[in-house]
């Protein structure tokens, strides 16, 4: 539960303030699209935080680096509470995200330090299940905070959350140093990225996570702008989507008793492609049908709860002695790709569903093609 809570800090940071996007935009006198871009900026900072934190956790131990990351996250959150223009919001958001990335990258590394294969996939699923409570309740927490104070209070809450996590880590988590300095120097990021068998799982993970970021950056705009839903109504729909994600997560854990992570990974990408097709149908014939859009979003995003655990387990299987660095490479790729893709789709947002639907179908197609390539391991 502690590992899941640590891993959930970024979903909390992203989702808690989603109901406040329109009020932040009004307060800062900018369009809501500019505030929504902070989701992509957060993921961008998260990517570089992971890239820095992974090797450091291999060298200095997981717990020490987690605490450093939480300190940076807390500082960024407090700065966000003082932001009075959109430029400050962007800069402070990246600082917050950098700390979140340093913290989160240690969790998959700790798991890989102890288990691999289907066992790792099951543990990733369990961590993801507990972690999903964050996006399920985060928008509701954000809405609740907004009933008492303005949006600045959300970032004060995130500061306190980081401090509580840091205190719990000091009391409960042993400092695990995964590798020694001699072995650490044998694997570089370049060797990880050019590993032909592991690379296909990295690409698939990046594409799958990009769909989640497309949902997070565009769902508030679509639901609250196209369908004129209130922040509380949006939070309810968002939470309902999370319920389906949790159900899919449990189905994946059960199927791991019978099928390999590689087989299930392909199956969930097919499911995501189906969600994209439903979105295309909505854009073509049902542009004002809230139910169709909700179904499309839910199918596409639910599939991610089966992709993430399986792709992580498959990828990290190839790097047993350098889990921190490999986890950082995987995290950087998914967050950098997700930030770029979601920012592009947000920029193309034109009050229709075409950009979102085309992007989801394209990403799922790329993943399926990559996973079916018969790459051979080369030196």
Image (spheres, rainbow, N blue to C red):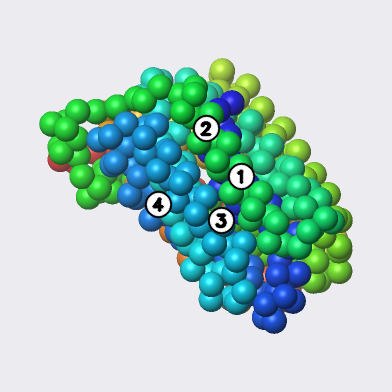
Pinpoint residue 215: horizontal percent, then vertical percent.
65, 57
Mark 2 vs mark 4, CA separation in Å: 21 Å
- Give the labeled residue for mark 4: 49
The mark lying in front, picked from 2 and 4, is 2
Label 1 with label 2: CB-CB less than 8 Å: no
Query: Is 128 displayed left or right of 176 in the figure?
Result: right
Q: Quadrant of the C terminus?
A: top left
Pointer 2 local density, CA inside 10 Å: few below 14, some 14–19, many at least 20: few
Mark 1 vs mark 4, CA separation in Å: 20 Å
Mark 1 vs mark 3, CA separation in Å: 9 Å
Q: Is residue 315 visible?
A: no
Mark 1, secondary structure of its residue: helix
Image: 176 above or below 373? above
Pointer 3 local density, CA inside 10 Å: few below 14, some 14–19, many at least 20: many
Mark 4, secondary structure of its residue: helix
Q: Nearer the viewer, residue 329 or 284?
A: 329
- Give the labeled residue for mark 2: 167
Q: Residue furthest bottom?
A: 29
Mark 2, secondary structure of its residue: helix
- Give the labeled residue for mark 3: 77
Label 3 with label 4: CB-CB less than 8 Å: no
Q: Which mark is residue 160?
A: 1
Q: Residue furthest top?
A: 257
């Amino acid at each position: 539960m502690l590992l899941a809570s640590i891993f959930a800090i970024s979903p909390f940071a992203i989702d808690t303030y989603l109901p406040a996007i329109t009020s932040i935009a009004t307060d800062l006198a900018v369009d809501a699209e500019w505030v929504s871009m902070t989701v992509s900026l957060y993921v961008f900072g998260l990517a570089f935080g992971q890239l820095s934190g992974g090797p450091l956790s291999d060298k200095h131990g997981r717990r020490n680096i987690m605490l450093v990351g939480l300190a940076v996250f807390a500082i960024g959150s407090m700065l966000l509470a003082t932001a009075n223009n959109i430029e400050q919001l962007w800069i402070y958001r990246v600082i917050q995200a950098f700390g979140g990335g340093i913290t989160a990258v240690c969790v998959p590394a700790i798991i890989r330090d102890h288990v691999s294969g289907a066992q790792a996939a099951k543990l990733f699923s369990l961590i993801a299940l507990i972690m999903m409570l964050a996006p399920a309740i985060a928008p509701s927490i954000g809405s609740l905070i907004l009933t008492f104070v303005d949006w600045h209070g959300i970032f004060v809450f995130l500061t306190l959350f980081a401090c509580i996590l840091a205190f719990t880590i000091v009391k409960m988590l042993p400092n695990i140093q995964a590798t020694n300095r001699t072995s650490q120097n044998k694997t570089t990021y370049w060797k990880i990225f050019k590993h032909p068998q592991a690379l296909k799982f990295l690409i698939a993970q990046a594409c799958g996570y990009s769909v989640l970021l497309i949902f997070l950056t565009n769902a508030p705009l679509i639901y609250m702008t196209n369908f004129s839903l209130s922040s509380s109504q949006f939070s309810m729909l968002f939470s309902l989507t999370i319920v389906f994600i949790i159900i899919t997560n449990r189905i994946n854990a059960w199927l791991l008793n019978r099928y390999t992570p590689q087989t299930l990974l392909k199956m969930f990408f097919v499911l995501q492609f189906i969600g994209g097709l439903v979105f295309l149908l909505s854009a073509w014939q049902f542009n004002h049908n809230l139910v169709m859009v909700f179904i499309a979003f839910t199918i596409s995003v639910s599939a991610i709860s089966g992709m993430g655990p399986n792709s992580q387990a498959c990828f990290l299987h190839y790097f047993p002695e350098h889990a921190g660095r490999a986890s950082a490479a995987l995290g950087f790729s998914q967050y950098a790709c997700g930030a770029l893709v979601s920012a592009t789709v947000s920029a193309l947002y034109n009050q229709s569903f075409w950009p979102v639907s085309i992007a989801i179908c394209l990403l799922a197609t790329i993943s399926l093609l990559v996973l079916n390539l018969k790459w051979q391991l080369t030196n």
